[in-house]
Amino acid sequence: MDATFREALLTAPDEGFSLWATGDRASPECEQLVAIAESLPLPTLVAAHAALASAASAAEPVWRELGAAGVTVGAFLGVTSSLMASSDADVAATAAAIYLAGARCAGAVPFGVLNPMAAFELSKAVRTEAFTRLRGAEAAPPAKSAGRKRAKPAANEDCDSDEEGGFGGSARAETRALVARELVLLLEQVPLRAHSEVLAQLVAALVGAAVSSAHGGRRAARAGKACGGHFEALSLCLRPEHGEPGATAPLVMRSLLPHLSLSPSGGSGSAAAGKEAIAAQAACVDFVVSAAAAAAPAEGSPADEAARSLLLSIQALLQRVALAAPDRAEPRAAVCGSVARLLRGLPPAVTSRYSRFVWRLAHVAKVGARTVAVEIAAAILELGAEGCDAALAAEDAPQTLWRLLLLRASDKAPGVRAKAVGCLSSLIAALHTPAGARLLALVQQPPALAAASPGGATPALPSPLDAMPPPPPRRDSEGGRSSIGSAGTPAAATPGGDASPSASLVSAAKMEASLASVASLLQSRCADERPAVRRAALGAIEAYGLASSDGLSPAALAAVEERCRDASPLIRKQAAKCLAALLAARPSSPAERRAWIDGSLPLCRDSEASVTDAALDSLEELLLRPLAAAEKKPSEAASLPLWPLLEDLSAAAIPTLQHALGVLAARGRTPPALARSVQALLSPSGAGCGAVRPPLWAMLLQLAQQKPKGREAVDAAAVLRCWRKAGAADPAEAAAALRVLLCLARRGALEEGELEGELKGELLSRLQQPDCDTETAALLVQICCALGGDGWAEPLRRACAETINAAAVLFPHTHSLTTSTRDVQRALVVYGELSLEEEDAAASAGSRASVSASTKAVVAAATEFAHGECDPALSATAFVTLGKLCMGSAALAKKLLPMFVRELSTSPQWAVRNNALVVLFDLVKAHTALLDRHVGSLGLAVSDASPVVRHQAILLLTQLLLEDYVKWRPSLLRAFCRSLVDAEPTLRAAGRACLFDMLLPRSPHLALASFVPLLFQLNGCTALPAHATPLPRDEKEALDLSGAEQQRPRLQILRALLSSMGDEQRLQATAKLCHEVLAPVLDGQMELSAAAVHAVVSDSLRLLACKEAKVGSGAGASADE
């Protein structure tokens, strides 16, 4: 031994080590040990280690010689312990090597060198001192350089050399390798069967060193080499000479638990899944797999006791890892993935038994445990789908885990349901790959449980539950029950109350687990009460539809389409993406096309920006970009996938398409050359024909309204050629072309004389033709007005007036026309358009147009047509014309207003009522003061007999309220509430969207202020003086929802209002019900025997008990609460 080191040992106090081990570091003996350690330089320590290592290799009697020279074991242990506590990592690591070399020397065991406390100091130094700083220094970034010159490190700063090592160059790498070699040599040469405590400390030291090395730093290859050396030493601890396999295997495996579970304490809780922790976890997985492979018996040979003990310990480790999985999602997913990778390298019997454990874990009362079970099952199946390994497809493991996911998809906890359905989504996609085909067929088969024992154990392996002592039981958050049984296994109780998980597994063997049943399950989850579950179900249905060769069933598509009208914006967005993905995968499927048109396309008008963006993205991807690309070969466009989609666009979907295109154009996202492509398809040589022309014209009209930009400009000459070709043979085509021309004319894109012939003369000539319908006539006049010019409007006006007056000569007496109805309608339309143009011109000049004698005559004639016994179409046209004439004259509007209001409620013709409603809407904007007292009549239109009129009333009233032309009043709120229970689903949806998405957010106190009065009014109750004012007769007839048979719609209205309130308003509303309904009954102010009072009290009690009255369940609650 080095003479300097020997002298230091001779001066060290013999009792210093015992004081050091007890923690009394302030004693004089411990201070003397520290002084001795500080006096020994690193070269002396290196030389001392070399001498001891050489003596150990030569089997020299070192400890006999040292004892003869006066060196005691206590002095040796004290000096090495104080050196291992040094702040210098090199000194601490070299001291650890000295101690290990000394423990290998002959006579070390009899002399007591293998001391448990000394081994503890070694373990602590390796885990918390030397190697922790070693890792930190290796991970430190290099010093930044100035210019091209490398910055010099500071005097005490670690440098990053090209040689292996972390800090201090290669010396530190050599020091770390030296400790690893000494550990290996000690375990190879010195049996530790009689020193179990020393073995336990060495195992802890080896795991700590291996994990520190696995972190890698910037030298991944070097870290892997060092990590392998430490795990090699750890594998030696499993040798029989170090103890019975039943004791050493659990000891080694238990030490890996904190690193496999990403939990420093080995218990569940918060943990971080950083790169270093994941690297350490992967190293532990590799070690366990390699240890199991090394202990596995030869093929055909029975397993020996060591191999069986090791497998039992690994099984117990896997169970502990599941029980100690962290709560955070990212670390928990990493833990579940590591479990799957471990099982992949173990014998199939382990996977089979572990699947039963996971099944039992999925039936405990603790929600977090069931979540972990779901994630582990999904991780195992997904890894098996990559290649269907024999280890992961053992016996009935895939069937058991598959049924676990299906069962937990209906768990009572929303988080577990969402996790199970989300795992099914990714798993369905993985199983439909070529590699997962075998596992897909396997999971649908029933599990073979005939050979299972009542406890669910296979005879291949005994229970591993006694291989590792159980952790202390944790109290469950649900009712205080323990979620861990007395043997450390999950408790037998299930969320559903099953008596035994094994019994539930046997019953689950009979459950239907085919893909058809999975599709049905996912379809039901789409209607789950929790948004998180519905979102996961939509993702799973999308994965199923994309993976399945047959696509989705009509019922599943209908379920996804229904989610496009979900109350949650998150679900509507997910549903839009789902339908877009399904259509992109199967553009030739009529069912997918119809579902996208009816479900996703209307979301382009959604009030939520993120939902609108998702719908616009799908429209751009599926229709607009392919359409723009068809410009080069328009004749071949009919063979493209977009063509059937264009053909399926209904008239109801075209306005939404125009709106979406306008939004994209405003954002600058219109595909280049889209206008040219659309015009090429509409041209005579293009492929556009039949059902695709209306949507193409609609898109061209929207593009014509945008500012032209290069190739995006609309060619007016091409549009005019289309109009001329259509002529009178195709009125719809001609009208579509005229709308585009009108838009171009208003933008100044048309100039008289620029196109072929005299455009205005051609338009006026078409107007005079007998087959010109009213819509075409209106468009022609509007285009001529947009083109401007003098001398053409007045003759046309006189001709129309003469036609109208001539037709009305005998009408008051005979109720017959002297002219054809079509000519009179056309004359009325043209005269009304010219009057609007005159009013606009007068307004631009700062004056008001006077009512001429001819106009008065036309008004008189149109009034006769409006309420006389003539053709309904003529009456409706007369109303429109009268409305246009009233726009410029307040006196005329005041005179005709009673007729408009009367016809709105009494006319037997829905077209007349609809036109009267539109006229009143325009008059509210033009003459607000005149219409103020008639706003209630507009509200009554929401209860009209015609669905068209009701829908029109909802939209027009919403616009008036949003633009502040009218103010909220009780009659309007009652009208909108009545629309919430309309017989037509589309009208109910429209009323809900207008009231709750657009109107009530602007008036946040309206719902609360009107809640209790509305309760009395819906029941027709006037028993309480505060609510004794009866409704007007006409409104009472329209709003009547009194009686027990109408309680359901009444509650639907009131619960919808409650759900729109915040928590504070909800508390106030329930307080109002108690004070203004229940208290008056108790005070005798209302007699409960009265039917109306009884209904009010019944409704109040039901409202107080409904879920919408619960604080935290309304508009202010989060989506997943």
Image (cartoon, rainbow, N blue to C red):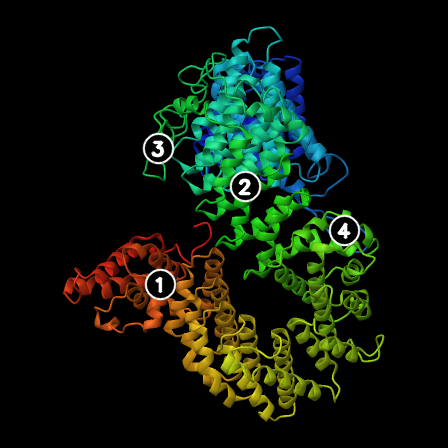
Between the residue at mark 1 and the residue at mark 4, the CA separation in whole angstroms equals: 63 Å
- The residue located at (60%, 74%) in the rendering is 821
Residue picked out by circle 3: 482
Which is nearer the N-term, disc 3 or disc 4? 4
Which is nearer the N-term, disc 2 or disc 3? 3
From this view, report whether residue 556 is shown above or below residue 917: above
Which is nearer the N-term, disc 3 or disc 1? 3
Q: In the rendered image, which quarter is residue 174 located in?
A: top right
The x, y position of residue 346, in whole percent, is 58, 20
Residue picked out by circle 2: 556
The residue lying toward the viewer, choosing from 860 and 32, is 860
Q: Secondary structure at mark 4?
A: loop
What mark, if any, has residue 300 been given in the picture? Answer: none
Mark 2 or mark 3: which is in front? Answer: 2
The x, y position of residue 95, in whole percent, is 60, 30
- Callout 1: few (<14), some (14-19), or many (20+) C-alpha neighbours within 10 Å? few
The residue lying toward the viewer, choosing from 1083 and 85, is 1083
Residue picked out by circle 4: 151
Mark 1 or mark 4: which is in front? Answer: 1
Identify which amino acid the numbered label 2 is placed on: Ala
Identify which amino acid the numbered label 3 is placed on: Ser
Residue picked out by circle 1: 1064
